[in-house]
Every structure is written in C-alpha cells, then in structure tokens.
Image (cartoon, rainbow, N blue to C red):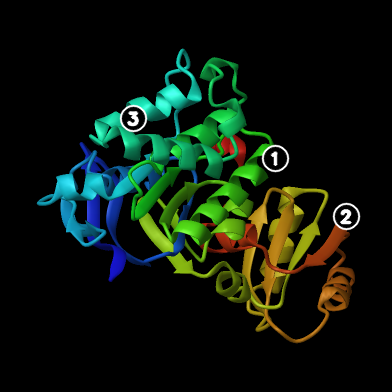
Amino acid sequence: MKAIIADNLTKVFGHLVAVDHISFEVEEGEVFGFLGANGAGKTSTIMMMATALNPSSGTATVGGYDIIRERDKVRESIGIVFEDLSLDTNLTARENLDFHARLYHLPKKVRDERVSQALDLVGLKDRQNILVKYYSGGMQRRLEIARSMLNSPKVLFLDEPTLGLDVQTRRLLWDYAKRLNKESGTTILLNTHYVEEADYLCNRVAILERGKIAVMDTPKALKRSLGSSVLSIRFSQDALASEFAGLLNGMSWIKKIHQHDAQLELSVGSGGMKIPEIVRLARKHGFVISSIGEHKPSLEDVFLHYVGKKLRDDEHE
C-alpha cells in the first residue's frame, strides 16, 4: 500500500493558486521531499495532507485514508512538526510530551512508555525535567520531533524542521530523522528550502515552483539528468555574458544556459573537457573571461536548471 497518494491536488486562496493540480505517490517507509522557495506551495500541500486545509479540488489519501471523508483516521495515523515552534516553554520536556499524549487518550502506562521512548530516541532523556525555555533551538526541534512520534504515526510531516538552526545542529537533526525512518519504518514527507537537506535525507525529491511539480526523481537521477558537468563562466559585465551566451546557443553539447548577472552556468552533456573549447571561442571573438570553473552537477544546479533561479535563504525569508 502507498503511504500517500495525491491526484490533481489543488488549493486556491482567492485569486492565488497555491497548489496547482499536483499528483504524486509516496511509498511506505520512504523519505520524500518537497524542495522549493517560500510561496512554492510546500506548506499548503502538507496542510491539506494533514487535514488542516481542505483542497479546492483533487483527492488524496494518507495511510490509506481519504483526507476529506476520513479526516479523523488520517489524524490518528500522522505526526507533524510545524515550521513555527509550538511547544509550551514553561513546561519541562516530559510535561510537554505527557500533555500531548493525553490528547490521544493513551492509558497512563502506555503514555509513560511512549514518552520515555520518544525522549530516548532524540537524546533528551537526561534533560527531560528541564524547562523548555532553557533549551537551545536544536533541542526544542528534537523535542518537537519526539512529540510527533507519541502516537506511533505511519506518516510524519516535517515542515521546514531545521529553519534558522546552525549547520551543526541541522546535521544532528538530519541524523535523528534518518534514525527514526530506519528504526521505526516511519514514512517521512519533508518540506525544505535547504538543497543539502533534501539531498542528504530524501529517497526522492519533487521540486515545487509556483504550485506545480517541475520535476521529481531521486537526487542521484536528478543530478545525472544535467549531464556530466556544469561550467561556470564569469565576465566583467552582464552585457558581455549575454553576448557570449548568444554565441553558445545551438551548440549540441550544451544542454542549458542560465545567466545570473555577469555569470553563465552551462549544463554540459558527456564528451570530455569543454573548458579549452570555451576559452578558444572567447579569444576568437574578443571576449575576456574573468574566471571559469567546472564541477559535477549538484541538486542546486538541478533547481537552477528546472526553475531558472538559485534557491537562496534570503529569498525564503
């Protein structure tokens, strides 16, 4: 059975189409990621899956339950970590989890066992009696993940779970998520605008842009789709980059050209080193290249290729 099935799922707010007829499936035990900038439709998609929003059209099932007709069943089978902090900071970690477990009407014995297991899973058992307001941002995120696991969910939704955290803490949370997926078999649907997060965690990634899925595959296959390498060529002026791009148009070994200010990014097919050919062409036509480099395609290159812009933190904010 598929953990998630979405068919032409759509959400409209007034004149804004936030989610535009998207269809996808997530296997049981898979870590599936939506990668996109703020406003791409990631959160609206998760909110519909979690039954917090009704779709404008289309259908979806989570854990085999319809998100409209069987919303109570869906809610019983999911966990969710929201982008914004939703803990009571004036309670201890154990008190936060115990309160949440009571909402699921768990018997005291089961409740105590689940709370202890969850605290142990995220490495907070030795700090369970400390008020949450004294926790670091990373510890609070780990506690939220622990809270989301109290009902042993079939599907866990993570909406920008590491937003605003430092790189080291972010990597620790990634490892907790991987451990959670491996040990409990929980299916994870991750929303993120961090390219490296999607690349590290996800079995498959869907790139969202303006409510539509631009492309969807494994991170490895997505990077392979760009060819063997990416060339970065910088000029002293934007106009020079535009003129040189015109010379490159039509070359069979170039899969796509993207210009960002005075820099060109070329997705290059197979066929060996192309830097000498670029340099010869520039000299022949009187262009002066400020710098040139080559690297293997990254997931950020994939995003640039299919969406036409880089994914930056400042754009998200």
Q: Nearer the viewer, residue 101 or 88?
A: 101
Instruction: Identify which residue is drawn at 63% across, 41% down.
Output: 170
Q: Residues within 10 Å of mark 1 (few under 14, many from 20)?
A: few
Q: Report x, y in % for residue 202.
A: 53, 60
Residue type at mark 3: give it.
Answer: His
Where residue 78 appears, as percent x and y from the top left, is 31, 48
**Mark earlier in primary sequence (2, 1):** 1
Which disc, if any, is residue 4? none
Name which quarter of the figure residue 288 lies in. Answer: bottom right
Which mark is nearer the camera, 3 or 1?
3
On residue 167, the disc is 1
Q: Residues within 10 Å of mark 2 (few under 14, many from 20)?
A: few
Which residue is label 3 attached to? 100
- Nearer the observer, 108 or 231: 108
Q: Farthest top residue?
A: 90
State the residue lying farthest toward the front: 109
Secondary structure of the residue carrying tag 1 is: helix
Which SS class for mark 3? helix
Q: Which mark is residue 290?
A: 2
Mark toward the start of the polypeptide (3 vs 1): 3
Q: Quadrant of the N terminus?
A: bottom left
Does residue 53 sit above or below 128 in this rendering? below
Alpha carbons under labels 2 and 3: distance apart: 58 Å
Question: In the image, what residue type sits under mark 2?
Answer: Ser
Taking depth in this image into account, of 300 and 73 the one nearest to the observer is 73
